Image: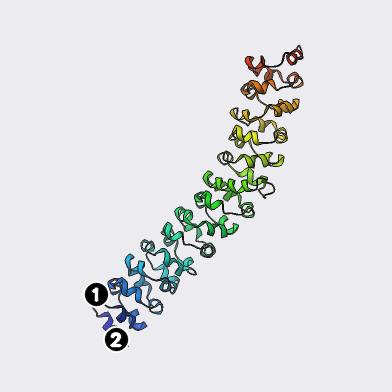
Amino acid sequence: GKLIEEQIKGIETRDIAGITNGQLQAMSLSQVTALSTNQVQSLGTAALASLTPTQFAKFSSAQLKAMTSNQIGVLTSDQIKQLNSSQLQAIDPSDVAAIRANQMAGLSGTIASFSTSQLAALTSAQARTLTQLQLDALNTAQSLQALSTSSIQAIATDVVNAMSATLINALSTKQVAALSSAQINTLSLAKVNSLTSNTLKALNTQALSGLNALLSVKPSVEAAGISSTQLALLNPAQWATLPTSVMAALTDKQVASLNSSQLAALSSTQIKALSSTTLKSMDTAQIQGIGTPALAGISTSTINALSTAEINKFSSKQIAGMSANQIKALTANQLNNLTTSLLQAIEPSDLAQIDKTVLASLSTDQ
């Protein structure tokens, strides 16, 4: 009754600290509610953990806010499971980190009630326990982006694998950039194909290596469902990390979507992986976008097979940067149809490597 509640409030905090588990469990729900914030702070951790879930559910927001980190840390998942939205939000963000990983299961259906400040305070150990259902709930509550980048990195790979493309696309660019290669590598090709341009562009080069590993399993990027539009979104640094297996699988249509900056980032090994038909399909701006060092990746047989129009797509600087063997591979027809500026760009020492019969076939104008 009311008298008993008043008596509860009159108990000194030093005496509250000595209450046994049995005495606390014997309290009625109204008596639990009558505890002052100072009395709650004085409760021993063992006694507090002994409260039944029903008793603990009667704690007010003020009582919960008064609890210390040590007290928060001893709560059971069953006790936490009883808390409603207002009660959960009463936990001070600085105390959220005290929730043990094995207590997180108690938030399976209520974590979306946390404020953005509380979510931002989650530790990596806590984030490692997050389930796909909890992440879905956060997205529905529009609070998914409150998770820190360290929390995103801590999400288990099997959980990332279970995340829908919609959920992944709901991450902020900073959160996407925090994803590790191991996390990305768990995604199915169908999910990769469903990533938005903002998500794809936000992937860091380390994470992209996880995507590369995934693509390498099924090198035909077109068959894998990776569109030309998506490939065109990759920045030069990302293109520089693509494995040769992926490069070799590029179609003419996909290469046509690349700009000079992306092509300039490719290495000679990557250029070498491109098929001769793909190289022949490039326009002048794309050919001239290939860095001079990367030209070493073009085989002599590919150079020999280029048409006169295709060989004239190269810049004077690129012709000057070709190796003696590459220049030697030029046919009489190619040389006869080179523009004057390109012909003059050939290094004299390389010109001397050209077969004498080929040189003899050059027109007097050249």
Where, by quadrant of the figure, is residue 70 drawn? bottom left
Number of dots carrying numbers: 2
- Give the number of the disc on residue 319: none
Callout 1 amino acid: Thr
Question: As rendered, which of 223 and 265 lies closer to the eye?
Answer: 223
Q: Position of residue 285 (x, y in %)?
A: 67, 32
Question: As rendered, which of 93 and 73 lies closer to the eye?
Answer: 73
Q: Is residue 46 left or right of residue 218?
A: left
Quarter of the N terminus within the rendering:
bottom left
Residue visible at 60% across and 41% down in the picture: 243
Element carrying mark 1: helix
- Give the number of the disc on residue 4: 2
Where, by quadrant of the figure, is residue 166 drawn? bottom right
Where, by quadrant of the figure, is residue 278 drawn? top right
Q: Earlier in the sequence, mark 1 or mark 2?
A: 2
Q: Position of residue 280 (x, y in %)?
A: 72, 32
Element carrying mark 2: helix
Q: Is residue 145 left or right of residue 354?
A: left
Q: Position of residue 190 (x, y in %)?
A: 64, 54
Residue visible at 41% across and 73% down in the picture: 79
Callout 2 amino acid: Ile
Reading the image, the residue beneath label 1 is 13
Q: Is residue 220 above or below residue 129?
A: above
For the view shown, which residue lies furthest in the front direction? Answer: 217
The reply to whether callout 1 and callout 2 are in contact (CB within 8 Å) is no
